[in-house]
Image (cartoon, helix red, strand yellow):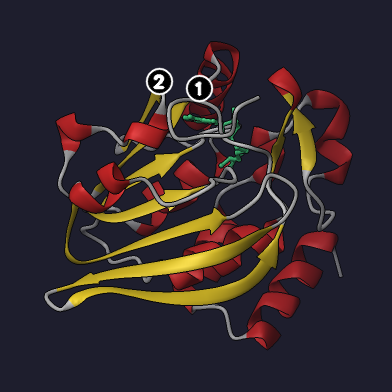
Amino acid sequence: MTEKEELVKKFKLMGINEKVISAFIKIKREDFVLDEYKGEAYADVPLPIPAGQTISQPTTVVIMLDALELEEDDNVLEIGAGSGYNAALIGELCKKGRVVSIEFFKELADFAKRNIEKSKLKNVKILRGDGTKGYAKDAPYTKVICTAAIPEIPDEWVDQLEENGVIIAPVGPQYGQKMIKLKKTKKGNEITDLGDFIFVPSRGEHGYNI
Ligand code: SAH
């Protein structure tokens, strides 16, 4: 069994949504890692990408996408494009919708754009900017996903989210966060804790002071 097949088997045992698994099979993680790490593309670990950042561990990626409850026609905001891998998976899962992914470092926004081109997805837009303020221009979103650690969920993300929309983000101190699922309802925000994770820190207005 290849390493990729081993991961698929693990995800099935974890109960990850079949559509998320199909997207994982289709989108090539090797297209989103640096040349020197192509051989390790399906090791279940985060890998270095430019600007001192990382492409998240495959298991973490599918846990977050599973929790996001994506529908084909979702309008998704991602904060932290990094390699573009997660944005590509969302683009594949939301074929009739679209995803805009914001990246703080220009070097990475360019890297993500180049990588996305390989997957031929037309519904994925990568922009350089500070995603902690959201991206009002394409709002409202049905889903928001943040792939960098964030001290608290910024009000802008909730404001830019439709009713019944979902936000997934690793929230808390710089060296250890809780994965938070926020559902915006008529009665207020429902918060669920999906467990402990460690992400690279967010910069920008509502990021860490680093
Ligand atoms: N989703 C990425 C992993 C990203 S790692 C992937 O699939 O490869 C987190 C990313 O968030 C890093 O690239 C980091 O530069 C970016 N980031 C940090 N602060 C940010 C901010 N304020 N706005 C947008 N991106 C930010």
Amino acid type of the residue that numbered disc 2 sits on in the rendered structure: Gly
Q: Which residue is mark 1?
A: 104
CA distance for labels 2 and 1:
5 Å
Q: Nearer the viewer, residue 162 or 117?
A: 162
Residue 103 visible in rendering? yes
Judge: label 1 CB < 8 Å from ligand 1.
yes
Residue 22 visible in rendering? no
Q: Are marks 2 and 1 in contact (CB under 8 Å)?
A: yes
Q: Residue at x 41, y 25 (%)?
A: 130
Position in image of residue 114 (x %, y %): 53, 20
Binning the other alpha carbons within 10 Å of mark 1 as few (below 14), some (14 to 19) or many (20 upward) gives: many
Binning the other alpha carbons within 10 Å of mark 2 as few (below 14), some (14 to 19) or many (20 upward) gives: some
Q: Nearer the viewer, residue 62 or 131?
A: 131
Position in image of residue 111 (x %, y %): 58, 20
Q: Earlier in the sequence, mark 2 or mark 1?
A: 1
- Identify the image quadrant of residue 121: top left
Reply above or below: 36 against 45.
above
Q: Which residue is mark 2?
A: 129
Position in image of residue 5 (x %, y %): 76, 68
Q: Quadrant of the N terminus?
A: bottom right
Judge: label 2 CB < 8 Å from ligand 1.
yes
Q: Secondary structure at mark 2?
A: loop
Reply above or below: 191 against 110.
below
- Identify the image quadrant of residue 205: top left
Q: Residue at x 59, y 86 (%)?
A: 15
Q: Residue at x 87, y 26 (%)?
A: 36
Q: Quadrant of the C terminus?
A: top right
Q: Which mark is residue 138?
A: none
Looking at the rendering, the quadrant in which ligand 1 lies is: top right
Q: Residue at x 42, y 34 (%)?
A: 120
Position in image of residue 53 (x %, y %): 71, 30
Amino acid type of the residue that numbered disc 1 sits on in the rendered structure: Phe
